[in-house]
Amino acid sequence: MVLILAMTLSVFTGCGGKKEVDTEKNDQTALTEETNEENQDGKEVSKTYFDEKIKVTEETVTFVDSRGEKITIKKNPNRVIGLYASYLDLWYEAGGEIVGRLKSSSNIPKAFENAEEVGTMTQPNVEKILEMEPDLVILRQDMKGQGELIPLFENNNIPFIAISYDNFREYSYAMRLFTAITDREDLYQEKVIKIKDKIDSILKEIPEEKEPSVLLMFATAKGVSVKLENSFVGDMLKDLGAKNIAYDAKLTDEEMQIFSMEKVLERDPDFILVQTMGDIEKIKDRLIKDVEENPAWGSLRAVKEGRYIILPKNLYLYKPNAKYAQAYEGLAKILYPEVFK
């Protein structure tokens, strides 16, 4: 009886496990599926998985933010403050306007350059933000100095959007949300759907038999680290069939780990790609000091064969947003030059 019971339980357990996997697979399929329906004017409107997460009425938009909280925002806000540079670009692409932004030396749309400054990335000027009486604040919830402001906005009844995105799919969600709030569905169709089609056409050309190994480094004037798959460039490389050699930290939520020359030499990647932040000359000095002066560095295949490449900032430091297709194509040309000439 004990044996029969054990066998019965094992059968149920096996079936349960398979069901979970199938459900997950179906859910992943749903994330990219699109269907076409006709609106009241008889025109086709693309419907995606995001429509299940974002509910739109004539006056409001209800969505789930990066904290998992359900939030309702009124459409067409007039006094918007942006607290993260990459999101300003998204808001601009979605047809939005702003009255305030953080101080930044780059990645600000020209249309927003004259907006009033309300502090820095890690030190927003809270008093000034409240004085401006915004009807919407856009922030990055997991950024130091910003997530802490959420209780303040809640206590003062200031609507806010707390989002975070690290890949094209999450960018698509953010754009679907922003264009719903600005009431510009046409911009979502024009900019996101067309980008997705271009990316899909690139991915179809990837040789299935190849799996180039890549070391993705992140260099500043202060130090060098290794980026993992869950960074936005790491995610693109994964989509393109590349293998990130920094796989020891796959189970962590962190995006990068300490650079280890020993492991790099052991795994000898096909490509070494470098993201940079800051003054490029100072970064090059740091790379020489921390990496290139090591006698063993020159023995790596990627170095000897000219596949040690510093990536351009405009596509691979800041979120590429509307240039996601160009970012994918740029990496594809590096990894598969025989296909993407």
Image (tube, helix red, strand yellow):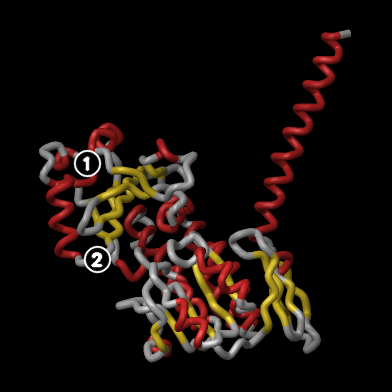
SS label for mark 1: helix
SS label for mark 2: loop
Q: In the drawing, does residue 41 fall left or right of residue 283? A: right
Q: Residue at x 73, y 39 (%)?
A: 20
Q: In the drawing, does residue 169 fall left or right of residue 128? A: right
Q: Residue at x 61, y 87 (%)?
A: 77
Residue 47 percent location from the top left of the image: 71, 71
Label 1 crowd (10 A; few <14 / some 14-19 / many >=20) = some
Residue 230 percent location from the top left of the image: 46, 51
Residue 37 percent location from the top left of the image: 77, 75
Q: Is residue 151 above or below residue 307?
A: below
Say which of marks 2 and 1 sits in front: 2
Q: Is residue 320 above or below residue 74?
A: above
Q: Is residue 24 above or below residue 312?
A: above
Q: Nearer the viewer, residue 322 or 333?
A: 322
Q: Residue at x 13, y 49 (%)?
A: 289
Q: Amino acid at mark 2?
A: Gly
Q: Amino acid at mark 1?
A: Arg
Residue 314 is tagged as none
Residue 90 percent location from the top left of the image: 50, 76
| Residue extending farthest right | 1
Q: Are marks 2 and 1 in contact (CB under 8 Å)?
A: no
Q: Looking at the figure, which quarter contains the C terminus? A: bottom left
Residue 301 is tagged as 1
Which residue is label 2 attached to? 278
